[in-house]
Image: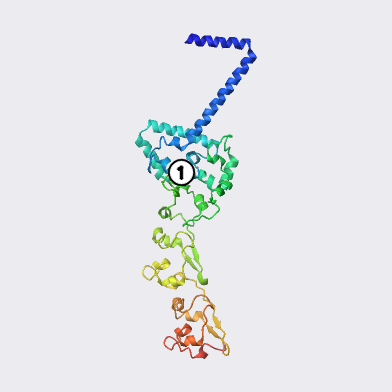
Amino acid sequence: MFKKIKDVLEKIKVFARNNPKSAILIFTLAFFLSLAIFIFIFVESLHISSEPKFCEFCHPEKKTGPFSEVYTWSKNIHATQEVKCLDCHGKPGLTGYMKAKFGGLRDIYGFVMYSHEHMSGILTKAATDPKYASEIVPNEICLFCHTDSYNQKIRKERIMSAGVKFRLMDSVKNPEFRKSKGLRDILTEELKSEVNLNHKKHLDAGINCLDCHLGVAHGGEYKNTVKTERCVNCHEKRKSEISMSDLTFNAYGQAVIFSHKSHNAMFKCDECHPDIFQMRKGSSKITFADHTKQKLCYSCHNNKKAPADCKTCHVKVPVPKPITYKVTGISPASFSHEFHTMIFKCNDCHTKIWPMKKGIKKMTMDSMSQGKFCGSCHNSKVAFESTECERCHTSK
């Protein structure tokens, strides 16, 4: 065997001495052919080992939980949009992709060399620990597809591919890709959701995507929605460092400022959200008629849990201007809010007697004599009789 090999090598040497140019050409062609074959096999192996079918060898379960990562991905919206394993488990760019492939070799070693229980513990931690999950899938991966600014910045700074498309992420260019998928820019555009959230504010505060969206692709759901309980739990734990802005209600010009800070000191978030108030600002409309219906603010401000007096919230209520009624053939009548609010509460008149919008109901002397409008009180029982014209229709 060795003698035969030695004879072949000797013949090659003789040929190279006698035909140096031909030998160099043949050796060069053989080298580049071998290199091309190697590159082809290498690239194809990268492609094959990047497919979910390959990952399924180590994640074969058809349920939820550890070892079911390929199955749960297949049920998720990311799968329908052809977003595969290496699109999320490798940072954007050629370098990020290759690092993920070498990391995959380490994972394969772990599956072969360590026990099933050991690997189950790692996968469970990735599914339940947001901090650990964020190390596996950092923010920039999510933001690369879901924003324009991050996408454009990363594409400008990194080599995305070497002329070969290894994954969908290589070709993602925003805003074109984002718009083709009907996605909003999560940092600049308002999202359609029950929570009026601010992604930029959360990211600036050091919150990771997976702090809120844990299980985004492997929860077994088509779309991963952030549960209200997660928001409540996080805000409850961090209430001392979270500054929720005050809300200003400006109905009918009488401003009420709701302080999250003072209420957080007394109550837990879930005592109000989402059963009494939805999480999205502006989704709960408060009207004057709600004051006595034991809902919204008045679930507590009912003189049982908290005061129901107007001045509790309307601390600086501006007194509405006097209303002047011009009547043909007689002096105008002037109605003073300042005088009447010293005697009556606002809801004694509004809105069961008077609507809150000026001029939408016309008052006549006949209607007053029938106990309507001003005649509801000016009936000689609560106040002087409405027929005492000169007391309202003064020339002054």
Q: List x then y, in percent, for residue 150.
A: 56, 46
Is residue 254 visible in this depiction of the protein?
no
Residue 212 vertical placement versus 46 (above, below): below
Residue found farthest to the right:
21
Q: Name the kind of residue labelled 1 in the image.
A: Ser
Left or right, 13 with respect to 217, comes to right
Residue 331 lies in quadrant: bottom right
- Where 364 falls versus 113 (above or below)? below
Number of other residues with Cα within 10 Å of mark 1, as a class: few under 14, some 14 to 19, many 20 or more: some
Instruction: Name the quadrant containing residue 231.
Output: bottom left
Colour scheme employed for the rendering of this structure: rainbow
Query: Residue 121: where, in percent of width, then height?
Result: 37, 39
> How many discs mark residues in the rendered view?
1
Is 139 above or below relative to 394?
A: above
Question: What residue is shown at x 58% (from left), y 21% (from top)?
Answer: 31
Quarter of the figure with the C terminus: bottom right
Horizontal and vertical percent for residue 336? 51, 81
Which residue carries the number 1 mark? Answer: 134
Q: Secondary structure at mark 1?
A: helix
Instruction: Report whether residue 291 is seen.
Output: yes
Residue at left 53%, top 9%?
Answer: 7
Image x and y of residue 326, in percent: 57, 85
> Which residue is rendered at x = 39% and y = 33% of the image?
111
Q: Camera-side residue: 54 or 67?
A: 54
Q: Is residue 119 left or right of residue 335?
A: left
